[in-house]
Image (cartoon, rainbow, N blue to C red):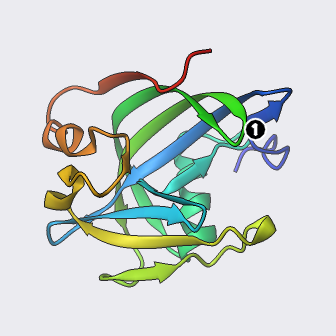
Amino acid sequence: MNSLSGRGDISWARKGAGFSYRVAGIVGHDGHVLLQNTERDPGYAFPGGSAAFGETNAETLAREFREELGAEIKVGALQWVEENFFHWNNTHYQQICLTYAVELISEIPMEGRFRCLETRTGGNQVWFTWMPIGRLRDRDITVYPHDAADLLARRDQSVQHIVRRESIL
């Protein structure tokens, strides 16, 4: 890891505004994708987290998968870049999220729902779920990005660029 790492996440929030630099990974298995969610947000996202200062995107993903799943991974090709503008917890956020293909090198549970190894401050437990790819279009399930099913279907094409404004800044 770079000698500059360990200086904290590249994210901040103050006075109603925030920024986040996130890196996520797509892991597929037997017609399912691995997603994460928290007890306070019923929506699902691809596993990952905030980049730390001095880390490459691959180092961020390796650290996040190790901390949260106890898994070693191989980071593949960049799949999509998201510019997200959203409102959460009384704060307007701008987030840059880079999503990569990921291959598991070590074992994790390969079905159902299971708990994250990392404990979050404030008790907001993170859970992982193997979601059938066909369910990503279901209206009763929220997945970030909202067009994840379409993006997954276009993975063999060029890197996708998404700009999503879910709030007015």
Seen in the image, is 5 located left or right of residue 139?
right
Q: Quadrant of residue 104?
A: bottom left
Q: Quadrant of the C terminus?
A: top right
Seen in the image, is 140 located left or right of residue 109?
left
Q: Position of residue 3 (x, y in %)?
A: 80, 44
Seen in the image, is 158 located left or right of residue 111?
left
Q: Position of residue 146 (x, y in %)?
A: 33, 40
Q: What is the number of callouts on the image?
A: 1
> How many residues crowd around disc 1 within 10 Å: few (fewer than 14), some, or many (20 or more)?
some
Above or below residue 45? Residue 131 is: below
Q: Residue drawn 65% across and 43% down?
A: 51
Q: Position of residue 115 (x, y in %)?
A: 53, 80
> Which of the two residues, 159 or 127, is positioned nearer the viewer here?
127
Residue 107 seen in the current view: no
> What residue is disc 1 on?
53
Seen in the image, is 69 located left or right of residue 100?
right
Q: Position of residue 90 (x, y in %)?
A: 72, 36
> Which of the two residues, 25 or 57, is positioned nearer the viewer here?
25
Q: Quadrant of residue 149?
A: top left
Above or below residue 15? Residue 74 is: below
* Amino acid type assigned to the residue bearing label 1 in the image: Phe
Residue 118 seen in the current view: yes
Q: Residue drawn 63% across and 69% down?
A: 67
Q: Residue drawn 41% across and 52% down?
A: 25
